[in-house]
């Protein structure tokens, strides 16, 4: 992928024991993990030993907003904080903190979006529930 194919991944996590598994799965199944830029609103408690992002704190792909869970103002507030970290990446992906991915998920999603653009859709949007 080219430099302009970066994916801005927004994750609002509130004391979620699946966050690390989500991040590791996302990276390991990506075709181009160097093109991933993570913005994480990490709402956590120091007492939750399972909830740590130490392995990612020095990774330049990660922008971590460290929030004591008692200071959180909800999911929409957290997502607003995440969106303020956007830095012109070509694509954006908003996730919950408990997802799993298919192999080469990033290339698959980009191919879907680009095929819609080729069909004349100027601003395609992929959604799922």
Image (spheres, rainbow, N blue to C red):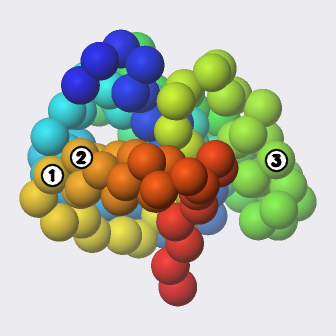
Q: Nearer the viewer, residue 119 or 111?
A: 119
Q: Quadrant of residue 124?
A: bottom right
Q: Is residue 15 left or right of residue 118?
A: right
Using the numbered discs, state the Cα–Cα distance from disc 3 to disc 1 in whole angstroms.
Answer: 28 Å
Q: On the picture, is 106 further left or further right than 36?
A: left
- Which of discs 3 and 1 lies nearer the camera? The answer is 1
Q: Position of residue 51 (x, y in %)?
A: 43, 55
Task: Identify residue for label 3.
Answer: 80
Q: Say which of 20 and 117 sits in front.
A: 117
Mark 3 vs 1, N-terminal side: 3
Do the CB atoms of the residues marked 3 and 2 lie less than 8 Å apart?
Answer: no
Circle on res. 104: 1
Distance of mark 1 from mark 2, alpha carbons? 6 Å
Which quadrant would residue 6 be assigned to in this image?
A: top left
Q: Nearer the viewer, residue 102 or 18?
A: 102
The numbered mark at residue 107 is 2
Instruction: Say if mark 3 contacts mark 1, CB within 8 Å.
Output: no
Please tell me whether residue 66 is drawn above or below residue 68 in the rendered image: above
Side (left or right) of 85 relative to 103: right
Residue in the foreground of this view, choosing between 128 and 122:
122
Q: Pick out the residue farthest to the bottom.
A: 129
Q: Position of residue 39 (x, y in %)?
A: 56, 37
The answer to whether the residue labelled 1 contacts the one labelled 2, judged by CB atoms less than 8 Å apart, is yes
Distance between the alpha carbons at the discs numbered 3 and 2: 27 Å
């Amino acid at each position: 992928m080219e430099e302009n194919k970066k994916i801005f991944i927004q994750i609002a996590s509130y004391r979620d024991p699946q966050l690390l598994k989500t991040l590791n799965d996302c990276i390991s199944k990506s075709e181009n993990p160097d093109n991933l830029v993570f913005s994480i609103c990490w709402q956590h408690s120091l007492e939750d030993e399972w909830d740590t992002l130490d392995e990612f704190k020095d990774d330049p792909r990660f922008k971590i907003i460290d929030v004591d869970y008692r200071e959180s103002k909800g999911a929409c507030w957290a997502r607003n904080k995440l969106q303020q970290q956007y830095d012109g990446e070509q694509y954006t992906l908003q996730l919950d903190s408990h997802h799993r991915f298919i192999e080469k998920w990033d290339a698959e999603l980009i191919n879907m979006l680009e095929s819609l653009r080729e069909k004349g859709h100027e601003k395609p949007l992929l959604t799922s529930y």
